[in-house]
Image (tube, grey):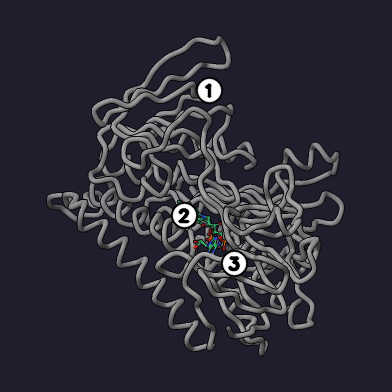
């Protein structure tokens, strides 16, 4: 069998990006992928299909709720669910096909099948054993199970089943108010489902700025999603393609039930390491079952590296991609770098929600003095022109130095706007640097500048 400089296990955003960078740096590279298509969770059953459905359902929402105000009259379109699924599938295949093209262009071998590592320097796929100077594990993650709840991917589904139910459910119960649950909950709510989100914590999207959490929940509630907070799901019973969810409220221990056509279990994901043979190799794991790595993404076994959802850190495609590029640099004898303090997080609902860096809660806990500059999208001309004046930009800076420490946005284009602040943070910029940068009018980005101005002498349009 061929001998490689690097074999990467898994062709998700971590693995495929790493392979391309390895090849660009002159390393003979192969990727083992067990799925029929490249792109991993993200392209096949994650980021991309969910965004296609979010887009399609958003278009329907616009037609139903906002067209008439703009003088666009006529019957709102009806939902052809099969066609919407085809649109989603077409989006997936365009993207996965694109990765295949890039593999060919960069002379990366795709070894099809499921890999194990019989020893450092060896990767076994089927009966073939391939040699590699270095191995990168980029095997990603799968939905985490909720004890006592059986997933059949029809009535009780994970995010994978929620991307292709046979029809739009009348009643959807989402267990877990994290990013995936809220994005998919929004899709089906816009398509006409009655959506109830049951969450154990008292706030949605754990870890986010608490002001954003409250505002976001209010907006989603106005859009029709129902929330049952502080509720521990006790079990889900299924009968004749229907489900009953039993939950207990933490505040008074009272029990109640909810009927559903589909129950989406969206309570998190866990690393997928099955079949790799890591225990026999002695690869160390964390208590949460993630592969332990050092600052160069090396495991404790020489020549074996790991990246992406399989290791610690936020389970995000761009974090996996950055690690993929960085580990390639390390393997090529260069310096690989990921700044874990500046990894943005985005929720692709309408409005979008995004965040980077420190929250106020975190800074309070650290006892660090900070200032907040806030600007509402109601004061942004472009947002009003597109009927998206809800939300705000909240910039958090060091009280003494004015250096940007974090930013939290809820509003139009939040997922793109956040990157101005990511760049500012990478360059150690102050709010004044952002405020002194000319921003085109009329753009949503002016709201970011206004928030920066609000950290100093004051916003103009507030
Ligand atoms: P994965 O993408 O999970 O890829 C791992 C690949 O390895 C898989 O294809 C698997 O088949 C393969 N593999 C595993 N073991 C083996 C083996 N032994 N042999 C061969 N192949 C193997 N993140 C974002 O940043 N933005 C989003 O908008 C977003 N939306 C999401 C929506 C949903 C519904 C879901 C489920 C996830 C979403 N994510 C999003 C998370 C994102 O998909 C993951 O963080 C990302 O895919 C992780 O990349 P990865 O390369 O580490 O692993």
Report the Cα–Cα distance between label 2 and label 1. Answer: 33 Å
Q: How many marks?
A: 3
Q: Is residue 419 left or right of residue 188?
A: right
What residue lies at 54% left-to-right and 42% top-to-bottom? 144
In the image, 118 versus 348, the foreground residue is: 118
What residue lies at 41% left-to-right and 53% top-to-bottom? 384
Q: Is residue 454 above or below residue 225?
A: below
Determine the secondary structure under disc 1.
strand
Determine the secondary structure under disc 3.
helix
Q: Is mark 3 within 8 Å of ligand 1?
A: yes
Label for residue 232? 1
Mark 3 crowd level (few <14, some 14–19, many ≥20, 10 Å Cα):
many
Residue bearing the label numbered 2: 412
Report the Cα–Cα distance between label 3 and label 1. Answer: 34 Å
Where is residue 331 drawn, in percent x and y?
74, 78
Mark 2 crowd level (few <14, some 14–19, many ≥20, 10 Å Cα):
many
* Image quarter of the N terminus: bottom right
Q: Is residue 212 above or below residue 341?
A: above
Q: Nearer the viewer, mark 2 or mark 1?
A: 1
* Residue 49 appears in view: yes
Mark toward the start of the polypeptide (3 vs 1):
3
Q: Is mark 2 within 8 Å of ligand 1?
A: no
Residue bearing the label numbered 3: 14
Asked if labels 1 and 2 touch by Cβ distance under 8 angstroms, the answer is: no
Where is residue 282 drawn, in percent x and y?
76, 56
């Amino acid at each position: 069998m061929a001998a490689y400089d690097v074999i990467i296990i898994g062709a998700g955003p971590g693995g495929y990006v790493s392979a391309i960078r390895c090849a660009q740096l002159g390393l003979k590279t192969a990727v083992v992928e067990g799925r029929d298509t490249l792109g991993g969770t993200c392209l096949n059953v994650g980021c991309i299909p969910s965004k296609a459905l979010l887009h399609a359902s958003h278009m329907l929402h616009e037609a139903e709720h906002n067209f008439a105000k703009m003088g666009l009259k006529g019957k709102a379109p009806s939902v052809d669910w099969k066609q919407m699924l085809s649109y989603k599938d077409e989006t997936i295949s365009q993207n996965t096909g694109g990765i295949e093209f890039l593999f060919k262009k960069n002379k990366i071998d795709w070894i099809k099948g499921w890999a194990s590592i019989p020893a450092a320097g060896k990767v076994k796929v089927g009966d073939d054993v391939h040699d590699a100077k270095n191995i990168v594990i980029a095997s990603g993650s799968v939905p985490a199970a909720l004890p006592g709840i059986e997933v059949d991917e029809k009535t009780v589904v994970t995010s994978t089943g929620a991307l292709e139910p046979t029809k739009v459910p009348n009643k959807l119960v989402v267990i877990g108010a994290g990013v995936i649950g809220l994005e998919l909950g929004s899709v089906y709510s816009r398509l006409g489902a009655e959506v109830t989100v049951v969450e154990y914590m008292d706030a949605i999207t754990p870890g986010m700025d608490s002001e954003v959490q409250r505002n976001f929940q209010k907006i989603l509630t106005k859009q029709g999603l129902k929330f049952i907070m502080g509720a521990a799901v006790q079990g889900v019973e299924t009968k004749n393609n229907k489900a009953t969810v039993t939950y207990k409220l933490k505040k008074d221990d009272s029990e109640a039930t909810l009927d559903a056509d589909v129950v989406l279990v969206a309570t998190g994901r866990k690393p997928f390491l099955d079949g790799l043979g890591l225990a026999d190799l002695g690869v160390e794991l964390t208590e949460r079952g993630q592969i332990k790595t050092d600052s160069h993404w090396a495991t404790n076994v020489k020549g074996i590296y790991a990246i992406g959802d399989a290791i610690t850190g936020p389970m995000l495609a761009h974090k996996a991609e950055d690690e993929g590029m960085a580990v390639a640099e390390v393997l090529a004898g260069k310096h690989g770098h990921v700044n874990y303090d500046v990894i943005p997080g985005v929720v692709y609902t309408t409005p979008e929600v995004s965040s980077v860096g420190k929250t106020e809660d975190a800074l309070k806990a650290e006892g660090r003095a900070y200032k907040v500059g806030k600007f509402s999208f109601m004061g942004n001309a472009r947002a009003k022109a597109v009927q998206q004046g809800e939300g705000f930009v909240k910039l958090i800076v060091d009280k003494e130095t004015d250096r940007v420490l974090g930013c939290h946005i809820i509003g139009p284009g939040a997922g793109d706007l956040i990157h101005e602040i990511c760049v500012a943070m990478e360059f150690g910029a102050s709010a004044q640097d952002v405020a002194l940068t000319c921003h085109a009018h009329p753009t949503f980005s002016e709201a970011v500048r206004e928030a920066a101005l609000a950290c100093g002498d004051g916003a103009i349009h507030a």
